[in-house]
Amino acid sequence: MTFSAAHPLIEIDGRPATEEGLRFRALDHYGHFTAMQVRDGRVRGLALHLARLDSATREMFGAGLDGERVRALLRHALDGVRDASARVHVQWPEAAADATIMVTVRPPADPVEARPVALMSVPYRRTAPHLKRIGDFGQVHHGRLAVRAGYDSALLTGDGGVVAEGAVANICFWDGTSLVWPDAPVLVGITMAVLESRLPAAGLPSVRREVTLAHLPGFRAAFVTNSRGIAPVSRIDATEFPGEPGLLKTVTEVYEAVEGDLL
């Protein structure tokens, strides 16, 4: 099997992608996906990925998606490769009897560096934010504008500066007592979901409550999470976070202690 970051392996319903199949996907962006890191043939939070795909397919197309079908297509595309970045895209052409599943395979992503990231707040909320959907122009647009302005990424906010999520990640804050996830319409990422239920056992209470830009100076630390891992946040706009020694280490250890599920 030969693939690279620029030239991923692409299969549609278990067969090599054809020009016709890719043309449909280039012209029709109504669909959803999930992205995962495969390590030694395992995926952290695999059940959560499968539940995400099933739920979104039911909402968008009116019928569910069999998790065993997804796992079989992932195994077929990986063809014995033990470490990779994989995505599962789901669309449902009109008049088709079932959803079509496209699996892409790229080299494994490097773990997120511990380098702190800077975020630029932007007044933007994704449509149907609970869905990991294809083709969100605004999300990509604001993320690129943030990079051009000297930041690492964007922080999406709503009316009154209510914090929601990063352009490509969830965000969590530390107030000295609890880890605070913004209580706003967001995509609950798999890394966030894996962490949220396990942090209290590590002595880190985890809560959800409204966070606004005006609240930021009251937090001592923040970090972002996505499929690549966890990274500290150094600042949001002009608000800098002093950081909390040991916090990110503990959070990362909690996440890395979670064993992946076999595909």
Image: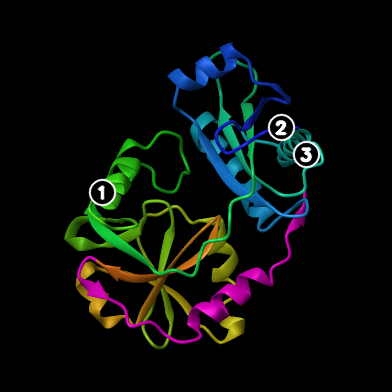
Q: Secondary structure at mark 3?
A: helix
Residue, disc 3: 75
Q: Amino acid at mark 3?
A: Arg
Give the Cα distance between marks 3 and 1: 39 Å
Looking at the image, tell me whether mark 1 or mark 2 is earlier in sequence order: 2
241 relative to 29 in the view: left or right: left
Residue placed furthest toward the right? 80
Write down the region rendered in magenta.
237-263
Is label 3 or label 1 in front? 1
Q: Residue at x 77, y 39 (%)?
A: 75
Residue, disc 2: 2
Q: Does the magenta segment cover residue 98?
A: no
Q: Residues within 10 Å of mark 1 (few under 14, many from 20)?
A: few
Q: Nearer the viewer, residue 79 or 69?
A: 79
Q: Amino acid at mark 2?
A: Thr
65 relative to 55 in the view: left or right: right
Give the Cα distance between marks 1 and 2: 34 Å
Give the Cα distance between marks 3 and 2: 16 Å
Q: Secondary structure at mark 1?
A: helix
Give how far across and how far down residue 92 sits, in percent. 56, 23
Q: Secondary structure at mark 2?
A: loop
Q: Residue at x 50, y 77 (%)?
A: 248
Looking at the image, tell me whether mark 3 or mark 1 is earlier in sequence order: 3
Position of the N terminus by quadrant? top right
Q: Residues within 10 Å of mark 3 (few under 14, many from 20)?
A: some
Residue, disc 1: 148
On screen, 231 above or below 131? below
Q: Residue at x 62, y 26 (%)?
A: 99
